[in-house]
Image (spheres, rainbow, N blue to C red):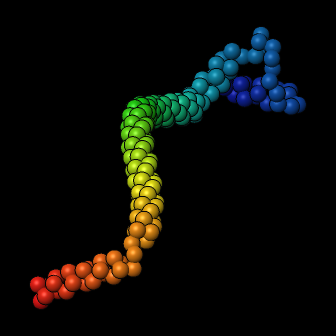
Amino acid sequence: MKNLTDSFVYLGHWPSAGSFGFNTDILATNPINLSVVFGVLIFFGKGVLNDLLDNRKQRILNTIRNSEELREGAIQQLENARARLRKVETEADQFRVNGYSEIEREKVNLINSTSRTLKQLENYKNETILFEQQRTINQVRERVFQQALQGAIGTLNSCLSNELHLRTINANIGMFGTIKEITD
């Protein structure tokens, strides 16, 4: 017991340190005290550090999962865009082929229509020429007939006397009278 009492007395005689601080001299510090401090820090700090590391790990994993989902979504959108592009290219090719076919059909139709129109115009021209020929022929005939009639009238007037003229008129009147009696 005396040792215990001496220990307490001895503690009372320690000189005061003056201020609190870290002693960086490794030989002057107590390695046991340092190991205790480090042990306490590790024991209590381990849970906090593990929580921080777990939270960081979860955030990284969530970020990776989100990135993977975004990547999958982007790949799906890319595939959809490629499918739409193939569809549009196919439709464009089809429109191009159909367009060329339609142009060829329209060209053939235009050529046929123009050919028919030209034939009709040729027929109208020929009919007009034929009509004009007939009209000209009829005009010439009419003039010839008028000239022949005038010539015949002139010949009759010069050859006929009044008496012959009256007998011809009476004969014609008689023929008309007989025709009239037959028809009645």
Residue occupying image coordinates x 44% and y 69%: 158
The foreground one among 122 and 182 is 182
Residue occupying image coordinates x 77% and y 25%: 10
Where residue 45 sits, quadrant-wise, is top right
Residue closest to the far right: 18
The foreground one among 122 and 65 is 122
Q: Can I make out residue 88 in this image?
A: no
The vertical placement of 105 against 46, above or below, is: below
Position in image of residue 33 (x %, y %): 68, 21
* Residue 182 falls left or right of residue 14: left
Where residue 171 sits, quadrant-wise, is bottom left
The foreground one among 55 and 113 is 113
Position in image of residue 120 (x %, y %): 39, 47
Position in image of residue 7 (x %, y %): 71, 25
Residue occupying image coordinates x 21% and y 84%: 174
The vertical placement of 136 against 68, above or below, is: below
Quadrant where the image shows the N terminus: top right
* Residue 8 falls left or right of residue 81: right
* Residue 45 falls left or right of residue 120: right
The foreground one among 64 and 99 is 99
Q: Total label count? A: 0
Residue closest to the far top: 27
Residue occupying image coordinates x 77% and y 10%: 27
The vertical placement of 59 against 29, above or below, is: below
* Residue 130 falls left or right of residue 59: left
Q: Can I make out residue 118 in this image?
A: yes
Where residue 178 sits, quadrant-wise, is bottom left
Quadrant where the image shows the C terminus: bottom left
Position in image of residue 97 (x %, y %): 40, 32
